[in-house]
Image: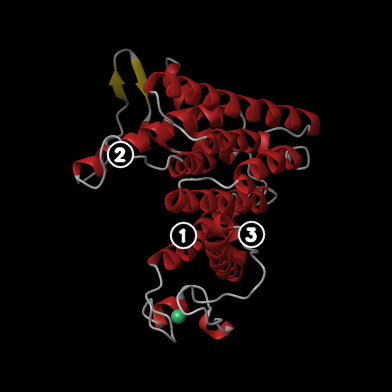
Amino acid sequence: MHPTRAPISLTHHRWDQSTLYSDAGAVHNRRMQPEQLALLAPVLLPFVALLGACMGSFLNVCIYRIPLELSVVRPRSFCPNCRRPIPWYLNIPVLSWLCLGGRCRYCRAPISARYLLVEVLTAALFLAVALRFADRPLLIPVYWLVVFGLLLGTFVDIEHLIIPDRVSIGGMLLGLALSPFVPLLHDTTDHWQALLRSGIGCAVGFGTLWLVATVGRWAFRREAMGFGDVKLMGAIGAFFGWQAVLFSVIGSSFFGSFVGIGLILCGKRQLQSRIPYGPFIAAAALVWMFTGPTLVRMYLRMLQPA
Ligand SMILES: [Zn+2]
């Protein structure tokens, strides 16, 4: 079967499929040649996956300890059931959980599959960031940090229905502080311009969701959206700018209603029960991080007649 090469004609617009779905605009901005990257890949990619899995392991510690207000450094990892410390050789990301069959070595208490999921997910997202932004290496460590924060907020919100201030307020401050040093985050080379765009993004993110939360509380006479979500959106604006905020507001409500309706249909939730909203904001922000500029280009191209 051959894909159709003829331009699709919807009303009077004529689009060429290949330009619609390819990342044509970004190719011109590449600084590193693909051949150079291909040479480095076999050495760098396993290292990135390992780094991601280790950060995922640390993330698990943070997800468990931060809501309980425990230190994330001391004491060493221990089994939450029998409290015995876990030696390093039983604390290897991904492998240990699989070898032990998801149970504590000593008391055989089950260890949540979340530990495995977080490690695999972090490794996969670290790899995806490295591959996607290989041509703009300065962005890679910043986006790894964003991935770490969004996953931390997501899993704490799922378990405790709160987003830690370290993620939301910390994210706002970090986004504002890093933007002038990595102006590429805001698609510019000017440090002050980047800081300005970060500030506007933060204000738009915080302001928009504050409005949604306030109107929601007034209309439904109950907490429709937590203040943690408001601060998280501020952080997303600080890192990605105001366009990302608009995308995340729309994207998260789309994901949220999709999953919410699914849960109600499966009988897992009632209409009134609270569903954490942070994970949907985080998911939308990640979609923006990987595809945002491409989506905007596609959208603008759709508006232009050929
Ligand atoms: Zn145990």
At horizontal 62% and vertical 31% (from top left) the residue drawn is 241
Amino acid type, residue under disc 3 in the picture:
Gln
CA gap between label 1 and label 3 equals 27 Å
Identify the mark at residue 197; answer none if there is no mark: none
Q: Is residue 115 above or below residue 99?
A: above
Q: Position of residue 208 (x, y in %)?
A: 54, 23
Does residue 23 show up? no
Mark 2 sits near ligand 1, with its Cβ under 8 Å away? no
Where, quadrant-wise, is the C terminus in this rendering?
top left
Q: Position of residue 300 (x, y in %)?
A: 48, 22
CA gap between label 3 and label 2 equals 45 Å
Quarter location, residue 242:
top right
Amino acid type, residue under disc 1 in the picture:
Leu
Identify the mark at residue 121; answer none if there is no mark: 1
Q: Mark 1 or mark 2, which has the lower sequence index?
A: 1
Question: Where does ligand 1 appear, by image quarter?
Answer: bottom left
Identify the mark at residue 260; answer none if there is no mark: 2
